[in-house]
Every structure is written in structure tokens, then in C-alpha cells.
Image (cartoon, rainbow, N blue to C red):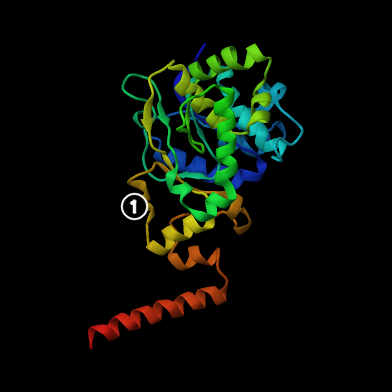
């Protein structure tokens, strides 16, 4: 029995406690429709997260998902990360929500949100489906991630007999439909004797498994949307916004939340997107770098002023 038509789901752990606290604080600040958030954590971390429980936040342990988990690396990815992907795919089995938005710990909500941001007027979820062409043209992302990610997406397409050469998927922050996921389990995994883990061993991209199954089965109407969360995948993307002077108010015109990927920023500590330019750049640059930037800025300003008075 489904408890709600829509909720949010956060899979986190002690190592991301500071991120999760920041996310949940922003969730309470901007949650105008009293949407419910389920926070799934390891059993041993329960004492750290209990204080987050409220009328709109429920803390759950991983106990219900352990039968699906792995203790070994998959495609060179540590077990904790793979098990997080499994929780996202299996959460529907708890019957807590017909549709659920998977939010990451590092995200921060930056403007008010309500049910209409996630669910269409006909009651079905919006689906985040994009080609990510802006990442295809970015050299740093292309060489580090794109080619292996594309290969893995093609592997999923082959497994699902997906014939369309265009693959529309998302990096995360998708609104999962329990109807689609149940169908995926009953009509794809179980006939093959597969588990969620078996699918991830073929290709460790849980959102693409969901997104291609969604598009191939036509079980629910597909109301396509662009990403709801602005993700900075690498340092260069974040620095570009900082250098251009793009403010958090600017980002809020297009997105509900912002996320600075901890894969590159974790060692720098938890920091906010809306920091002053010098403070934000200081996370990435040493004093010599900042001095060079300052000299370049002064030189540019002097050159422009000099040209005006010629």
C-alpha cells in the first residue's frame, strides 16, 4: 500500500553528516507544501541523525535493504556507493510513496518549492531527461568522465534492447515512479534471476537503468523537465560561476537547489555557493594564485581606463 503520492528520499551516512544537516535545514526553510523527506542511514549512524526527525522528516535505517547489499567493489566503485544506488532503486518496496525525489546530501535548496515542482497536474511525476551536451563539449569532463559514462549507458541500452541512438538520462535528482520500478523488477530483473546488484554489475548507473526503462515501457506519461538541481561536477564549473559573478539569486531563477560535488570539494571542507568571490576562490587557489589574479585584474582595469583617456 502506497502511503503518499510524493516524497523525497535522502540516502546518507555519518561521513556526510554536515552536508545532510545543511540540506535538511534548507529543506525546512523552503518546503512550502510540507513535503515529507525520508532519510535512510546505516544502523550504526542512527544516534547521529535522530535529532533530525520532525513532522516532515523521518529517519530510517538500512535494515530493510540489507538483503540487496554488497560488501565488494563493483566496477572499481566502493560498496557503500553501490549500496546507495541500490537503496534508490529499492526504496519503492517500502510502500511509503508512489513517487520520490532522490536528493543528494551535498545539495542545498535555494528557493521555495512545492508539489507542483515535481508532480504534473495529472498526478504523474515530471521526468528529468537530458542529453548533457554542455558536458560533452567540456574538455575536462569529457576526458575524465564522459567516455566511460557513455560506454556504460550504451551497455544499459543494449541490455534493455533500447534502439534509439539518442540516450536521454540524468546524473541524479530524478523523480522515481514506484510503478515504473516495480515493473522493472518484475519484467526485467526477475525473469533473468537478477537482483538490483546484478544490474549494477552490468553498469553502475542506477538512474539510466530507470530512465531507459521508463522511456521504453510507456507505463506512465512522460512529462519531461530539465534538471531541478544545478550541479557543479568539477572545480572549473564552480570557478566559472564565481568569476562571472553569478549569484545564488541568479541560480535560483532556474533551479530549486545547488550542489557542489564533494568528489572534488570534500577535502576543502563544506562551503556555500554564495560566498564572496575572494573567499570562494580561496578554496581552490593559494596566495600566489590570488596575487596573480589581482595583478591581472588591476592591469585589465588600468588598460581600460588608459584607453578611455587617449
Q: Residue at x 47, y 20 (%)?
A: 216
Q: Is residue 253 above or below residue 123?
A: below
Residue sitting at the far bottom: 310
Residue 280 appears at what percent x and percent y? 49, 63
Mark 1 lies on residue: 250
Residue sitting at the far right: 72
Determine if residue 187 is in view: yes
Residue 187 appears at what percent x and percent y? 57, 12
Element marked by disc 1: helix
Q: How many marks?
A: 1
Residue 112 appears at what percent x and percent y? 36, 40
Residue 106 appears at what percent x and percent y? 54, 45
Q: Quadrant of residue 209?
A: top right
Q: Residue at x 34, y 25 (%)?
A: 120
Q: Is residue 307 above or below residue 153?
A: below
Q: Quadrant of residue 156?
A: top right
Comparing 75 with 91, the one in front is: 75
Q: Quadrant of residue 265?
A: bottom right
Q: Residue at x 76, y 34 (%)?
A: 72
Is residue 237 found left or right of 151 in the rendered image?
left
Comparing 89 with 145, the one in front is: 145
Comparing 6 with 226, the one in front is: 226
Determine if residue 19 is in view: no
The quadrant the C terminus occupies is bottom left
The crowd level at tag 1 (other Cα within 10 Å; few <14, some 14-19, many 20+) is: few
Amino acid at each position: 500500500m502506497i502511503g503518499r503520492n510524493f516524497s523525497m528520499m535522502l540516502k546518507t551516512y555519518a561521513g556526510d553528516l554536515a552536508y545532510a544537516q545543511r540540506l535538511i535545514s534548507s529543506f525546512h526553510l523552503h518546503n512550502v507544501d510540507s513535503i515529507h523527506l525520508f532519510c535512510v542511514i546505516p544502523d550504526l549512524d542512527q544516534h547521529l541523525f535522530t535529532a533530525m526527525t520532525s513532522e516532515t522528516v523521518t529517519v530510517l535505517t538500512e535494515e530493510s535493504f540489507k538483503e540487496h547489499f554488497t560488501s565488494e567493489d563493483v566496477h572499481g566503485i566502493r560498496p557503500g556507493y553501490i549500496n546507495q544506488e541500490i537503496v534508490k532503486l529499492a526504496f519503492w518496496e517500502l510502500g511509503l510513496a508512489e513517487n520520490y525525489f532522490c536528493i543528494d546530501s551535498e545539495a542545498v535548496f535555494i528557493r521555495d518549492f512545492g508539489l507542483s515542482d515535481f508532480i504534473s497536474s495529472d498526478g504523474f511525476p515530471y521526468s528529468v531527461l537530458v542529453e548533457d551536451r554542455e558536458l560533452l563539449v567540456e574538455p575536462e569532463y569529457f576526458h575524465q568522465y564522459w567516455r566511460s559514462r557513455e560506454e556504460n549507458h550504451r551497455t544499459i541500452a543494449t541490455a534493455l534492447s533500447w534502439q534509439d541512438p539518442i540516450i536521454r538520462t540524468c546524473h541524479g535528482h530524478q523523480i522515481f515512479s514506484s510503478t515504473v520500478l516495480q515493473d522493472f523488477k518484475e519484467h526485467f530483473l526477475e525473469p533473468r534471476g537478477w537482483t538490483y546488484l546484478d544490474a549494477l554489475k552490468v553498469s553502475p548507473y542506477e538512474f539510466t537503468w530507470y530512465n531507459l526503462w521508463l522511456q521504453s515501457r510507456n507505463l506512465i506519461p512522460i512529462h519531461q523537465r530539465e534538471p531541478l538541481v544545478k550541479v557543479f561536477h568539477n572545480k572549473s564549473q564552480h570557478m566559472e560561476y564565481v568569476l562571472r559573478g553569478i549569484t545564488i539569486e541568479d541560480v535560483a531563477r532556474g533551479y530549486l537547489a545547488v550542489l557542489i560535488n564533494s568528489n572534488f570539494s570534500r577535502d576543502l571542507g563544506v562551503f556555500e555557493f554564495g560566498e564572496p568571490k575572494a573567499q570562494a576562490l580561496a578554496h581552490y587557489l593559494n596566495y600566489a594564485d590570488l596575487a596573480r589574479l589581482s595583478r591581472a585584474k588591476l592591469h585589465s582595469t588600468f588598460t581600460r581606463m588608459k584607453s578611455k583617456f587617449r
